[in-house]
Image: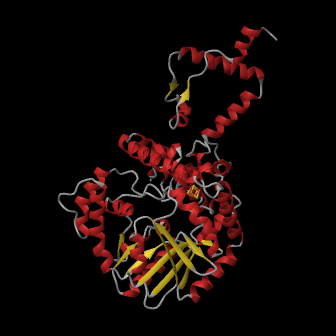
């Protein structure tokens, strides 16, 4: 996977992708704005959400222990996973123990983060995504590109083609006369998934929230396919990030108002499923909860990172981001794209790879993400501080071209005579390029900087010379 500047440039060349993204993000954005405007005390609700999350994260050890006790008391088995490998090993072992070789899945970011589907496949277990958008991504042999709408980059005609081509290969095929009307596409998906729901013995899910007080897990969704997974199979395995815990059932009052309005622009999710362990004779009779760390305690120990763990994965920040809107989610190289992905990935995965080092710069810092975030994560501020960290990590050893450029700039700015000389050269360049609006690519070592941005044409006259001409020496 290339780093953001390269991946973004490729995405920008895809006009169809940009059209799909523009249409989808603007539609959700307008719905969200209307739903939020209905709430008189929205700002207060946001502050409450942030405060509950901050309190929980400060006492995470206490609440996780309480959650484990509550879950165990309710008949669930709790497993702790330090990283993706351990989580995959636990889930694979649990599925194998049931004697089945397939599972149905509710949409879950945590399982995508740990690449559970691939791990299951290697163990000879097939995982069927049941969320419509996830199904489109899976059948298209594609990657999700949005937190909430993983197939946002696909339009209806593309989805029809995928269904016709792929469904029959792995189960009930799409009807030959399938059109790209939403109702017909949903009907084809329903027919395809029904067979899998009725056969499945094991389901794998995530959770939007986990209540420490009662051991209740919560999944919110729009289609009802998740609820089929949560109720029909005999065994349910939930992979839950440790930051999903909230202290009390009453706290859900705040988050179940914030989440749907921020994510889909609805007052309430069509389906909010809550379950507490095992109920004899009703629903799954074996419930396993895998509590996943995978870099979260590192983020928690970091004064920057703790705030990012407030995220409730609503995707509002993606839908308002001018950068995401133009390049889509694949360019971020992670299941967490957009502004929050640019913060979370370097925090959770570190900044050792080129992909993660580039992410804090994948933003215009316009601030729209902070305004939209229901738990008030100061994403632009976090991005600036992460950029500083990336630069600091590069100190020592051979200076980078960027560091040399900064040194040269400091040398020039330190002397009025040198600055004036540089301004004269710049004005000369401005006069030579008169008539052009911007420069696409600068020569020599500056090419790396201008590869990812357009440079303005310099003014043909410096401010100093304009001042002298207009005002004399005053
Ligand atoms: S950072 Fe805020 S706006 Fe973005 S997904 Fe998380 S909660 Fe939603």
Q: Position of residue 134 (x, y in %)?
A: 38, 63
According to the image, what is the colour scheme of the structure? secondary structure
Q: Residue at x 68, y 62 (%)?
A: 48
Q: Nearer the viewer, residue 457 or 16?
A: 16
Residue in the picture at 56% in, 69% down: 294
- In percent of width and height, residue 319 lies at 50, 49
Task: Evaluate whether residue 176 shows in this view.
Answer: yes
The quarter of the image holding the C terminus is top right
Q: Nearer the viewer, residue 13 or 349?
A: 13
Q: Nearer the viewer, residue 68 or 118?
A: 68
Indicate left or right for 360 with 326 as reference.
right
Task: Determine the residue located farthest toward the left in the rendered image.
Answer: 176
Quarter of the image where one finds residue 415: top right
Q: Does residue 188 appear left or right of residue 226 in this picture? A: left
Q: Residue at x 78, y 8 (%)?
A: 472
In the displayed image of the protein, which residue is found farthest to the bottom? 280
User: Which x, y percent locates residue 197?
Assistant: 33, 76
Image quadrant assignment for residue 176: bottom left
Answer yes or no: is residue 354 visible: no
Above or below, 377 relative to 129: above
Q: How many marks?
A: 0
Which x, y percent locates residue 245? 61, 72
Describe residue 160's horizontal placement relative to residue 107 as left or right.
left
Residue at the spot 73% in from the left edge and 30% down from the top edge: 411
Q: Quadrant of ligand 1?
A: bottom right
Name the outermost residue toward the right.
Answer: 474
């Amino acid at each position: 996977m290339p780093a953001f500047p390269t991946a973004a440039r490729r995405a920008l060349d895809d006009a169809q992708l940009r059209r799909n993204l523009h249409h989808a993000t603007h539609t959700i954005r307008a719905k969200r704005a209307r739903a939020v405007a209905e709430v008189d005390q929205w700002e207060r609700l946001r502050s409450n959400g942030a405060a509950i999350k901050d309190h929980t994260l400060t006492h995470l050890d206490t609440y996780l222990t309480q959650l484990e006790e509550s879950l165990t008391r309710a008949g669930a088995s709790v497993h702790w996973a330090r990283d993706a490998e351990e989580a995959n090993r636990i889930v694979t072992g649990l599925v194998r123990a049931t004697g089945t070789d397939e599972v149905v899945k509710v949409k879950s970011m945590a399982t995508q983060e740990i690449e559970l589907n691939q791990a299951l496949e290697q163990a000879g277990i097939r995982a069927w995504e049941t969320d419509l958008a996830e199904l489109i991504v899976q059948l298209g042999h594609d990657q999700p590109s949005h937190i909430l709408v993983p197939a946002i980059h696909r339009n209806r005609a593309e989805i029809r083609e995928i269904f016709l081509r792929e469904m029959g290969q792995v189960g009930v095929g799409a009807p030959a006369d399938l059109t790209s009307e939403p109702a017909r596409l949903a009907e084809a998906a329903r027919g395809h998934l029904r067979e899998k729901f009725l056969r499945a013995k094991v389901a794998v899910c995530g959770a939007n929230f986990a209540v420490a007080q009662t051991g209740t897990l919560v999944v919110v969704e729009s289609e009802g396919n998740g609820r089929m997974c949560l109720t029909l199979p005999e065994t349910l395995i939930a992979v839950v990030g440790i930051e999903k815990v909230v202290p009390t059932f009453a706290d859900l009052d705040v988050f179940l108002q914030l989440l749907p309005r921020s994510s889909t622009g609805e007052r309430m999710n069509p389906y909010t499923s809550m379950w507490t362990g095992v109920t004899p004779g009703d629903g799954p009779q074996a419930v396993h909860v895998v509590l996943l760390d995978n870099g979260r305690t590192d983020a928690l120990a970091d004064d920057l990172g703790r705030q990012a763990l407030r995220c409730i994965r609503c995707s509002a920040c993606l839908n308002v981001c001018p950068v995401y809107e133009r390049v889509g989610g694949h360019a971020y190289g992670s299941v967490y794209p957009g502004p929050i992905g640019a913060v979370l990935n370097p925090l959770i995965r570190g900044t050792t790879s080129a992909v993660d080092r580039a992410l804090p710069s994948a933003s215009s810092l316009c601030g729209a993400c902070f305004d939209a975030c229901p738990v008030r994560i100061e994403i632009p501020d976090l991005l600036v501080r992460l950029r500083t960290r990336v630069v600091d990590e590069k100190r020592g050893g051979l200076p980078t071209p960027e560091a040399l450029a900064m040194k040269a700039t400091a040398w020039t700015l330190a002397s009025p005579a040198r600055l004036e000389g540089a301004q004269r050269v710049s004005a000369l360049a401005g006069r030579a390029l008169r008539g052009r609006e911007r420069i696409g690519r600068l020569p020599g070592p500056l090419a790396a900087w201008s590869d990812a941005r357009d440079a303005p044409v310099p003014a043909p006259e410096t401010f100093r010379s304009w001042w002298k001409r207009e005002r004399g020496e005053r």
